[in-house]
Every structure is written in structure tokens, then in C-alpha cells.
Image (cartoon, grey):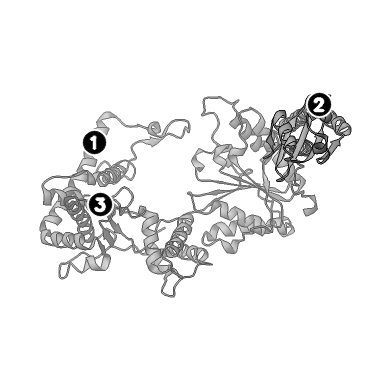
Amino acid sequence: MDSKIKLPQNKPRNSFFYLIMAALIITAVVIIFNPGDGSTKKVSMNTFIEQVKNAEVKSIEVKNERINITLVDDTKEFAFKEKGETLREILQGVPSDVVNDIDTQIVSTEGEELWYSLLMSIVPFLLIIGFFVFMMRQAQSSNNQAMSFGKSKARLTDKEKNKTTFKDVAGAKEAKEELIEIVDFLKTPAKYTQMGAKIPKGVILVGGPGTGKTLLARAVAGEANVPFFNISGSEFVEMFVGVGASRVRDLFKKAKRNAPAIIFIDEIDAVGRQRGTGLGGGHDEREQTLNQILTEMDGFEKDTNVIVMAATNRPDVLDPALMRPGRFDRRIVVDMPDLEDREAILGVHSKGKPLTKLVDLKNIARQTSGFSGADLENLMNEAAILAARRAKKTISMKELQESIEKVMMGPERKSRVLSKHEKEITAYHESGHAIVGHMLPNCDPVHKISIISRGMALGVTWFLPEEDKHLYTRSKFTDELVSLLGGYCAEELVFGEMTTGASNDLERATSIARNMVTQYGMSELGPVIYGERNHEVFIGRDFGHVKNYSEEMAKKIDAQINNFIDIAYKKAKELLSKNRPLLDRIAKSLIEKETLTGEEFASFFGEIKVPKKVMYSKSTIK
């Protein structure tokens, strides 16, 4: 099986490399045969004759028209004579006894001149020939690239390098069970074929960003002892029509040659979008590529023993022909991890990180409701970076707690200094949120209040759910609306006017109220959904909402939304007016400390009666 797989080999060096080497060698030869003058001084012929007359010259070397002079003090000089002129003719006015005392040498350069002339005449031709050879090689290389333009860019996973197994994947129990069955099918097909079962054609992993779809695919590659080809959906599509379809054919051809094999297409929505919705009709590149994938996955060929795996976080835009049984037989949902899964994921990503004995991963998992696997990995990495920055040898709960806040709300912006008045407004605003939320039974408990700027927010009130929730009631939403308007009402109650700090709260409150009316059927308009999403993917998000109700109903919807907001506003203002002294005390403490924990906040209530928080038992959540 593995003998069929050819690993990529090193490419030969480019001819341009050899051309450069040849040029360097020629340059070195020229320098050797034609050395520079360096620091040698050039003198005139008259100066040379005067130096000879004054007995200042120690030796003379005549080389063609050049006279190399060495003075008595070993200083080097040179001069040039006319061609054909002899040294005796030059020094005819100098006494013969002075000339005889000078060591004189005549150097013949006939051979050197011949080689130098030959070299200088050949070098230009060599450079021209080398240039043409280089251009021809480049043209040949471009031709090869053009011929391989339609070849698949799929990468064959090395089973020994960076091997990932299902043991490295925490959580996603149901998804792992489905994929383990696929791997077992490839390893022992006889166990299933004797029962009349057929190998699945395709498996698609569906889930939000960061939930571990690609990680599960890598685990399948590590577990299955078969060739694993992985490619991204965007690598099929090029500007030339037909290239994507050609690459699909080549990919499946390689996989069938190495069958049984697995093909993994990441982000398949890049090429598998619903046909007939774009502006290019049925002849654009993406649709031709999709047509070829559909043909390869369920064509006339049978028993190819090639399983196609794919991953996407947008299953709603995929073509129905791609999602039907016979192509993608199994649709595996990779959901956000629950409390138990988050604890297991934190355990995986804490390996190799020195944690203190007081670190409670279960407590961290409880505080990270809604975190994906990628968020949890980032959390542990941020904690390690923070501990290293502080020159610590271990990671404590303090670093983990700060990392949670950093991942959720961004880093602390200590450089943003608030004025005394702005700090007071922010403290009352956040205290209003916390007090209203604490006194409503359906709001989550207050975990922390801070007036330290994070991200775009001047302050934050952190409500932490005590358990994961999958169903939300009408009373939960109405209490959350009251809590969101707590900061707005606190500003109005204390300062007599509102600031721009409540804009995000109002935006979230309006969105919740609108969804209660139009999406959840929680208003007096009854159990009807108003407005539906347009699934034509080329239309922008702002135009994707289809209005399927009359103008008269639109007025009623607006009235219901305003009613929800108005009731929440009155209730928040009532609660804060009754507890104005409590609001002042908490705000004053927050200004002094800048941060209050949930325990410190709860201690302000003393004997004040607070409704018991509503908890959903696990048996009621389906």
C-alpha cells in the first residue's frame, strides 16, 4: 500500500545558479591576471629619471610599457614609457655606473598577453550563450508549470510527522465515535461487508469556527493507516475556467491509485455553494468545479474505497446535491464544548505547562461558557505568556483568570486615563447593571465588576452562568432586558442625563426585544415568525431579510418591541430608585478599588432580600 506513495524529491538547482558561479570564477581569473595598483604610487618619467640620477632607486622591473620601481626605502612606484622605447634610451643621460648599481629585470609577457586576450574575447560569447541557455531553461520550466496547472495541489499527510490521534482530541464524543467507525471500516472492511454494509462515500463535519473540525480530520489521518490527502476548497478555484475541474479529476485519480484512501477538503463552502444563484449562470469556474466533485463522488464507478471528508461552518449555503446521501452520507455536527468537554480540553492544552497545585481546571471551565476549543487553547497560551512575562516558574489561577478576561473582553487599557467625572459615571453605570441583575431571579450571578477599560468598553459587569444553558425562556429575556437598561437608568437617576456609554447596551436590548417578537413568538402577536432569511448567497447580508408581512403588521411589531423596552426601563428605574443608598455605596467602593469580585459585591446587600436565582435542571434541557 505505502509503496505506491511517492514522496516529493528535492528539485535540481536552477541553471541561473551555475551562471552566477561561472561569472564569479571569470571575475576571479581577471583579478588574478590583472591585479590593481592598490596603494602603489604613479610617477612621471621625469621624476623617475631624477630618482635614478640621485641613486634613490633600488630595483627596476620592466613589463611591457610599465616600469615597476622599488626605491631604496622599499617604497613601490610605477611609471609608463612609450611603446618600443628601451630602458637604455630612457636613461641615456644618467651616468652608467649609477645605472649598473640598479637591479634591473625585463619580464616577458607574450604568453600572458595571449591568454588574457583569448579570455577577454571568449568571455562575452560565454555570457551570451549562458544567457540563451538560461532563457531556454526558464521557458521549459514555464511550459512544465503550464502543463501541471491542472494538477491537484493536495498534500499527502506524513503519518509519522506531527501525528495526531483521537487521544489528542478532547470532547466531541459523538463526532469521534462516528469517525472511529470510518477508520475501522478502512482497516477491517470485511467485518462490515459480510453484513452487507457499504463503505460511506463522504463525511462532512459541520460546526462553528474553532470547534475542532480540522483537528478531528488530522486525528483521522493519524489513526487510519491509509494515504490521507488534504486540500482547501479555495485551492481548486483559479481565474481560468476548467482548471478547478481538472484538479478535482487529478485528486481523485491519485486517491484511487492509492486506495483505500481518504480525501479531506477543508472549507468546502468555498467551492460547494449552491448553483444557479450567482451572476455567472452555470458556466463559471466554481460551478464547473462543483459539478466535477459531484460526478467523482457518485459517478458510474463503484467500490473505489475512497472516502471524502469535508469541513464547513456554513452548511446552509452548500448545494443540496452535494449534501444528499450517496455523496455525503454522514453529517457530523461538531458543537461547542459543554462543561465536561471544556475541562477535558483545558487538560489537553495544559500538558507541558507547569501549573500550580491550586489550579482548578473545572472552575476555569465553568467560567468559560461559550468558549470554543480554539478559545480554550488561546486561553492557556495567554496564561503561559503572562506567567513568563512576570518571571514566574508556574502558572497560577491568577494568570488563568486574567487570561479569561483578556480573551473575552480584550486586554486592559491602562493607558486610557478617565477624568474624575467620567470615572464616577462609569462606576454608577456598572453598579446599575450589577444591582438590577442581582435582584432579578432569571439573570446570571454577578462574577465581577470593573471600571478598568478593556477593548472598546470603559467598564464591564461580568455575569457568569452557573451551568450551561441550551434553552432560554421569555422571563430570562425580559430580566436580561432590565439588566441591560440598569446602567442607562443609573446615569439618568444620579446625573439627570444619559451618556454615550449606554449605546451598546441599548443595541443589545433592542436586538433581544426584536428577536422575541419576530423570531421566538414571545409577544402578544402570537406564535408567528415575522420575516425570513433569504438563502440566495450572492445577496448581501443587509438585503438577505425578506419582509413577509404588511405595513400594518410592521407597526404592531414596532409597538411590541417598544413595549418590551419600556417595561424593562420602568422596572430598572424602580429597582434603582428603591435601592439608591445601595447604589451609592457600591459605586463609591468601585471608584476606590476599581474592581469588585462577586463575593465583595454580594456582601453589600446584607439583609436585603434578593430573589433566588432560577436554575434549569439538566433533565429539562434537551
Q: Is residue 43 left or right of residue 537?
A: right
For residue 125, which numbered disc appears in the image?
A: 2
Residue visible at 22% across and 65% down in the picture: 601
- Residue type pointed to by label 1: Lys
Q: Observer-nearest residue: 287 or 383?
A: 383
Q: Quadrant of residue 290?
A: top right
Which of labels 2 and 1 is toward the front? 2
Under mark 3, the amino acid is Val
Q: Earlier in the sequence, mark 2 or mark 1?
A: 2
Helix, strand or loop at mark 2: helix
Q: Is residue 58 visible?
A: yes
Measuring from the top left, give residue 432's x and y in whole percent. Answer: 19, 55
C-alpha gap between disc 2 and disc 3: 73 Å
Q: From the image, state whether disc 1 or disc 3 is nearer to you.
A: 3
Could you classify mark 1 by the number of other residues whose Cα lies within 10 Å: few (under 14), some (14-19), or many (20 or more)?
Answer: some
Residue assigned mark 3: 417
Q: Which mark is residue 556?
A: 1
Helix, strand or loop under label 3 = loop
Q: Secondary structure at mark 1?
A: helix
Q: Residues within 10 Å of mark 3 (few under 14, many from 20)?
A: few
- The quadrant holding residue 449 is bottom left
